[in-house]
Image: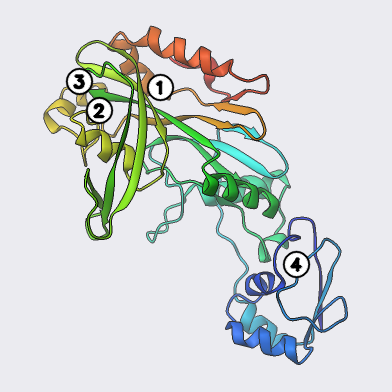
Amino acid sequence: MKEFIIEENEAGQRFDKYLAKLLREAPKSFFYKMLRKKNITLNGKKATGNEKLLKGDTIKLFLSDETFDKFAGSSQAARAYCELDIVYEDPDIIIINKPAGMLSQPADDGEPSLVEYLTGYLLKKGDLTEEQLKTFRPSVCNRLDRNTSGMVCAGKSLAGLQFLSKIFHDRTLHKYYICLTKGKIEKPDHIRGYLHKDKKTNKVIVSRQEFKDSLPIETKYRPLGSNGKITLLEVELITGRTHQIRAHLAGTGHPLLGDTKYGDSEFNKQYIRHGVRHQLLHAYRLVIPETDQNFVAPAPELFCKIIKEENLEEAYHENLERNMGLRKNDHHSSSDRNACE
């Protein structure tokens, strides 16, 4: 017999969801059968699996060690270690300023992603234990392209994941990006269209008209400054589709500087000598109206270098200072002191 006590980090989920994590390799039919036979009990009683778990609940599994080990599988969660730029952290959620070049989520090639770095960080810090990893694994709630930098939200606890999932789903979390685009954009706009992803090429097509398997997209933008050749743009992502900002802006004739997939190759060539080899797109601000919080992560070094060389520094700083003062409870990245100096 094995006994498990539900901790705060595991409370609030359905019993069958918990069992699916505990017995990862078991078919659902197995633990439903065990529930019916009272080989798995909740607080000493027969359960159906749809009960909502509470802190302190006791779960008993009357299974042989061989059966448990067979269905539990490997509980070793992948982890990696590097210094993370933490914008905000509390017991339930963490917001990380992801550098360009880092994956948000695990890929098939086994390269460490932000998820593995987050797991390693929480284990090292003591906010997570190997035992807890058997039934809970921290996860990111929004993804950024590998070469897009900026803020990624992650849940450190089940409650944190549920909160973040809700505000992302309900679109009550406002997401703002800054980017450098080709040409001069003079007025704010709210553009709409339809997007279809080609899984074979990992590229999307954007159209003003709806077509088969397309999804509606909405993008708002506001020019912060321009030198006639390049515009520093603030973009609010209303929907969050794959490559949405990159493809949507390219469709308006203003592709992102450095974008090798949707951009202007001749335009990009002019900046290769400056070190620009990927899109200059940065998720720099998050606003959560429910909690009156405003989070800001200033642009990375390369982005700032181009801003300065294109004489857009003043526009950038004015916008940054305005947004960092929006809320009393504002937060910002630890790297902001060196931003664009």
Where does the image place residue 3, in percent across and percent down from the top left? 82, 75
Label 3 SS: loop
Q: Quadrant of residue 91?
A: top right
The quarter of the rendered structure image containing the C terminus is top left
**Residue found at the far bottom of this picture:** 37
Among numbered discs 2 and 3, the one appearing first in the sequence: 3
> At which x and y percent is residue 22?
67, 72
Instruction: Give the camera-side residue of 215 and 146.
Output: 215
Q: CA distance from mark 2 to mark 3?
A: 10 Å
Left or right: 290 in relation to 248: right
Q: Which residue is mark 2?
A: 257
Look at mark 3 in the image and give the residue it sits on: 183
Q: Quadrant of residue 272?
A: top left
Q: Which residue is mark 1?
A: 301
Q: Residue placed at 38% from the left, 18% from the top?
A: 304
- Residue 189 is marked as none
Judge left or right: residue 181 versus residue 41: left
Q: Position of residue 166 (x, y in %)?
A: 59, 49
Q: Earlier in the sequence, mark 4 or mark 3?
A: 4
Furthest residue to the front? 209
Q: In the rendered image, which residue does mark 4 sit on?
A: 52
Label 4 or label 1, whichever lies nearer to me, is 4
| Label 4 crowd (10 A; few <14 / some 14-19 / many >=20) | few
Type of amino acid under label 3:
Gly
